[in-house]
Structure formats: C-alpha cells, structure tokens
Amino acid sequence: MEKGVSKLHPNVSTALRSQVLTVTFASAIREVVQNSVDAGASRVKVVFDPTKLSFIVTDNGRGIDSQDLNQVGRQYFTSKIRNLDDLKQLNTFGFRGEALFYISNISHVTVVTKSLNSNQSWIKKFPLSCCVYKGQQEVDPWFKLDFLPKEKSGTITLVRDVFHNVPVRRKLLNQQPLFKTIFEIKKDLFQILMKHPETKLEVAYLDHHGKHNQLIISSDIKPEMDYFLKLSQCFSNVFGPVIPTDMFSRVSVGYKDCSVIGLISKCSVRFRENQYIYLNGRRYVDQSFKKLINGVFQTAGFGTVIHSTNSMRNIGKTPSNYPLIIFDVRCPNVAEDLTQDPAKDILSSSQAQILHPLIIRAVNSFLANQGHVANHLMIDEIACDTPRMISPKKHVLLSPEIPQSGLGFNKQTSEMKLLGKSCLSNIRIPRCSKREYEVAKPVNNKLREDKQGTVARLVLQAVQGKPNYNNTTPLPNWNNLGGSEVIRSAECKLDRRHLAEAEVIKQIDEKFILLKVPPAGALTNTLLVILDQHACDERIKLECSLNDFLHQVFDGTLVTQPVSSCAIDVDVTDGYLFKHYKDEFEKWGIFYDIRMSNLVDCLLVVSSLPEVLQVKANGDKMFLKDVLFQMVHDLKNSKKLPISKLYAKHHCESPKKAFKWWKYVHYLPVTFQDIFNKRACRSAVMFGDTLSIPECTSLVKKLAICRMPFLCAHGRPSAIPLLELTTAAARYNMTSKNAKNPYLDYKVDT
C-alpha cells in the first residue's frame, strides 16, 4: 500500500457507502417494494431466499420507458423531484436517486420492465445497457423473469447475492436468525401498506430446504372500507392475530393543518415492539417520545387487570403492559425532516412542539374513554417537553425536589452504601413498606466489587440540609451521642471472613441478630453489626437453590415432568421466534413443538416442563404463556444471553460443592429467579421466630460462606453497621441515659 493521503477509488467509496444505505437484507427488499408502489403498483409480489440472500419483486406499476431504463440505477438520477422545493409536496417514499444504485453495487441486479406505450419488454442487467427482453435460461422457478403481457405494464426486479463482494457483511447476514429477518421485512412492508392499504401484497420465502412458505397475503382491503378498518385489517394481514380486530379503538384529533388518526388497543400487550408512529408515511423513531407515551399509559394504570388466578403471577416484577399503537400523523413536509436518516426515517420532527401535544391529546382521550385516569401532571410535562422521573417498578411519579435518600443496594455486588442524615436514622427496613422502599431508592448508588466479589463496603455518609419525606418515624439522630463524629466519615469494609469470625451477642426483638465483629484486615476497630435474621436465612436458602438448579442444568440431570393438553395460541411472528430459540428452551427443561397450519393459526404445544415450573404453573396456561413469552423476548432483546453455546463449552463435570453457580446466574430466566426468590422467602426464618445463641451462630456461619452475604433474595440489606468501638469514643459520655438505649424503636436489653 502506498503511503500518504490519496482519494479512494470510486469503486471502493461506492462499496463503503452502499453498506451505509443498504444495511440489511430486509432494507434492500424495502427499497425495491417502495419503488413499486411509487410507480403506482396496485399488486406487488415478493419472494425471498434468506439463505442465498436473493429476492424478486414483481409489480403491475407503470413500468419504465426504454429511454429511461438506462438511467435507472445511476447515482442521483430520479423522477421524484427536481429541486429542494419539491420536497414540500413529496408524496413518494423515494426521492434521492440512490437506493437501486447502491443495491446494484453490492449485488447482482436485473430489471425487466414494460410500459403501456410499449409493445415489448425490456431488460437491464446492471451495469450493462438495456435491450429487448427475449427470455431467459433461469432454472429456479421462484426467481423466474416472465414476459409481461402486451396489454399491461409492470416491472420485475431480481436481486441476487446481496453483499457478494463484502464477505464479512454477508457472513453476518447469513448468521442473522430467520425470525429477525422476517420481523424486519414485516415492519417495512406494514409501513408501505399503512400509506397504501389497498395494495394487494403477497410475500413468500424459501427456507433452508428450498420449501416455499407463504408469509403475507394482504388482498382483502376494499376501497369502500373505513380507513380505520383498513388499518386494523392490514395489521392483522401482516403480523397475524396479535389482538382481535375488535379490540382496537379509533382515535382522531387535529389542529390547523396537522392531524393524528389511528388505532390504540383496548387490551395490553407485554412488549412494545408493536408501536408504530408514521409521520407523512415515514417512520417516526423518536424513542424518548415513545417512552413518554408509554409513561402516560403506565401512570394511568393501563393494562393492570390480572387475568390469572394463580398466585404465582404475583412473583417478582409485575409484567409490563403496553398499548398496541398505530398512529398516522399528517402535517406539512419539511425538507430537514426528510434528510435525517439514510433509511428515510424521521428521527426528530421540526414540528414536535405541535405534534407531540396533539398525540398526547389523542392518548388522553382514549384513556378517558376507556375509564382510565391519566396523570395530568405528567401529561403537562410531556406537552411542554420537560420529562420527569418515573419509578421503573411502581410507575410512581417522583417529584424532582424530593431527595432520593435511603438504603440502596446493587443485586450484582456484595457492596452496600448507607445514605441519610445519620447512620441510625436510616435503619428503617422493618418499618418501611415495599412501596416506600422503592420510591425512596437512591439514584446515586456507586457500588464496587473486588476481583473475588467477596468484599462489602459499608459506607456511612451524611446527606446534609435535606428534610425526610418518608412516612416513617426516624430513629433518633446520633448528633448528641458519643462517637458520632468518629463514625460519620468512616469507611468500614466487611467481607465473609469478618462474618465467620463474628461473635453473636444475642437476638434482638425476635427480628435481628446483634454481632460483635473483631478487627481484622481493613477493619481496624471492633464493629457492632445488626443482621436481619429473615434476610440472612433467605440469602442462604436462595444460594443453595441456585447452586442445585444450575448444577442440574449444566450436568444434564434436570428433572422434567410431562405436560398433557397444553396448546397455546401464538401469532405467526412469535412462532418463528420460538422456533429459533427451541434449543435454548430445552436446556432449561422446556420442550415444545411449533405447529403452523396457515398464515394465521399457530400453536405452541408444550410437552414437558422442569419440575420447578410445572409445580408453580399448576395447569394455568395464561401464566405459562406469560412465562414463555417473557423468556423468548428477553432472549430476543438480549436482556438474557443464550446458554446453549455456553453449555457446550462448560458442560459440568465438577461436584456440586465446587460448582461456581454465580458465573451463570445472569443466564437464568427471570421467572426462575423469581420462583427461587419466593421459595427462599417463604421457607426462611421469619420475624417473630425465637432463635437461641447456637442457632444464631449457625445462621451467621452459613451466611459467611454465601457468595453475596450482605443482600437478601430481593436485594435488600441483610447487615447494617451500628457502632465502631474506638478509643476516641471513650472521650464521650457513652454511659449516658441516651447512649444506653439508642434503639428507641426496639426493646434492647443493655
């Protein structure tokens, strides 16, 4: 390679640029189909082969005159616009004159076309010139270039071997799961049908065996149908029966020359993939605004009805409930909006100050009609584009002026940090309700873990000058007690070794265990620590359960139980998703088959489940469906990593006691984690249980060998430092009446 700076060869720069504009196989299909509808096609047929990365699009559009055909596919050649002012009246998807040019630079493209004023078909094989089409020698029946009838017009576009000259990108596309390709194609084609709902669209694909599979048929939309009915029917034609069509509610609102019309589902869905906002036919992908819309629905309590009577549905996090949204937003075109993204999506509208409040008004009207009370405070905030914080667990609107002080812990570390006006005034775990705990959860937790993950830092830090907004009675401040200044700025490090050497003083109020931790390592003085007896035993039982279960998974000895008559209805899109992750589910002891009889009907037939899930599901199909959907969408969205590849590399050969379960706990499905958490909680020592000194000592010894001894199963603290006994404390009056009994909320014998 020559040294110095030089201009890239045109072929190189074009190939690099083509990868930016044609990012995926689905985007190439989208661009060609958009060209078809821009040419006035009322019927479009698509067949694609995801294995060979090839596709063919046939339409009955206006066709291309022979004199224009040689200009097709040249960079910046287009019939849509002549100058920037034309963008204001633009009514087509394409306008840049780039799509076919870039596709032809990374694939083999052939176009056969015929216009009405021509008696013969013409063919152009890029980059050659066009000529009269005389037939072909193609042997593949699905990618056949037919003659177009003399009395009709249309175009056939054949694209073969996408990214044939970019082997790395081609390899990545070949590794992409089929369900992702199918879902991308469906989303892209639904955008086209949203703007042209009467277009008769047929889509099919060839699987890896070469079998022809019908994917989409949208041919039942009549001109006389209501626009809202057209929308709902198009959605069902593309995505299948995600929800019944009669569960859509119509919304319509306008202001001056802007309008919002569309559909919102009356019932909720668990995932937000099916939320579509189109601005003048283009995807509006402002994610922050979509997040705020979902916040309005959540604060209004949308979709909170529990359909299952199984108590296990209350385990762990409440399932998210999202509306299915289809909004067709119309307003004057703005050139800056149309040139933001290579895919011609709109990332941020220049008219957001009008459109956002208009959309929120439509949402508010829907919620009111459905009997939900929207949070007007939050709606006002969204309307003026000043978002507020929302608690992710309880959807509680938090006022920014309320200090976020309290106890905060990170489930992924053994380290904890105590924040508040004083160390004792924050010990509220027994009195603080779950809701109060979550609202008061601090946002400034800075938790660190050593390389072995065994050290916990107990940091005592003051938050000065802020009132306490919790509805709890704080314990007395230490400002008047001896030793306060010594401990307020101290950083005390505890690890499992300290717990192993700790001495049990006694049980307190049948709730806590008081320990005296001798100085060792980084701990230079004796420390008094109070343990939550329930949290400690809960942590011990949880880690035992996780070790047993994960060892069985990797050892291949996981016990499963057969299930009879368990067929669950799923839409076709999710059917492909479950097909892809079938091996992953089997590693967790969940066995099923996918049965697709047509474009609409799809059944997930479960044949066996692991014992831990079988017992809890107890025949409740709705609960089981929620569990399976949670698992598959967590895998799809990379919230959980697949264990299949890891399983092959790390097949368990070590004994159970030596098994390092904590390396794999992040792969554990959420529902399994919730079940084990609940089991540990129910079987652990409770508040009110009397423990002898030997029993307390045994509990502490078991806790000392836990991987994360300072957190309960739910992430709350199991240990709180009370007092560091130092020589400096002797200068204070530690025998005063107040110092003898600082725990005014509890009975402590001194």
Image: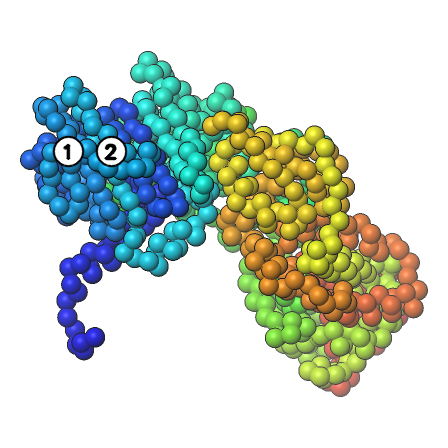
Colouring used for the render: rainbow
Quadrant location of the C terminus in the rendered image = bottom right
**Number of other residues with Cα within 10 Å of mark 1, as a class: few under 14, some 14 to 19, many 20 or more:** some
Residue at the (90%, 61%) spot, across then down? 691
> For this view, does 249 lie left or right of residue 310?
left
745 relative to 606 in the view: left or right: right
Q: Is residue 441 above or below residue 79?
A: below
Answer above or below: position of 561 versus 264.
Answer: below
Residue annotated with mark 2: 145
Distance from disc 1 to disc 2, alpha carbons, whole Å, reads 10 Å
At which x and y percent is residue 639? Answer: 54, 52
Looking at the picture, how far across and down is residue 735, in whole percent?
A: 83, 77
Viewer-proximal residue, 347 or 127? 127
Q: Is residue 191 at least partly visible in the picture?
A: no
Q: Which mark is residue 133?
A: 1
Up/down of 228 relative to 673, above or below? above
> In the image, 501: left or right of 631?
right
